[in-house]
Amino acid sequence: MQIETSRMYVRDFTPNDINDLHEIFGDSETMKNCEPAYTAEKYQK
């Protein structure tokens, strides 16, 4: 799936996104109102 506007581009995750996902979902401050920070195994799935 892809959605593109003049200011935004949304696409499915790819394996190349793993470092960016880790930076976001592995941060306990970012995740404090959602759920515990993800482990590497969880966001690789």
Image: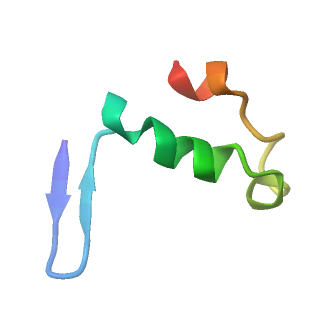
* Residue at point 60%, 50% (across, down): 23
* Residue at point 83%, 40% (across, down): 36
Residue 32, quarter of picture = bottom right
* Residue at point 72%, 34% (across, down): 38
Measuring from the top left, give residue 27's x and y in whole percent: 74, 51
* Residue at point 49%, 42% (across, down): 19
Q: Residue furthest front?
A: 19
Total numbered labels: 0
Residue 15, quarter of picture = top left
Measuring from the top left, give residue 1's x and y in whole percent: 19, 41
How is the protein colored in the picture? rainbow
Q: Is residue 19 above or below residue 3?
A: above
Q: With 31 as the anchor, is 20 left or right in this view?
A: left
Q: Is residue 18 above or below residue 10?
A: above
Q: With 40 as the anchor, is 16 left or right in this view?
A: left
Measuring from the top left, give residue 21's x and y in whole percent: 52, 44
Measuring from the top left, give residue 16's x and y in whole percent: 33, 36
Q: Please state which of residues 25 and 2 is positioned toward the viewer in this rendering.
A: 25
Q: With 13 as the anchor, is 28 left or right in this view?
A: right
Q: Is residue 34 above or below residue 12?
A: below
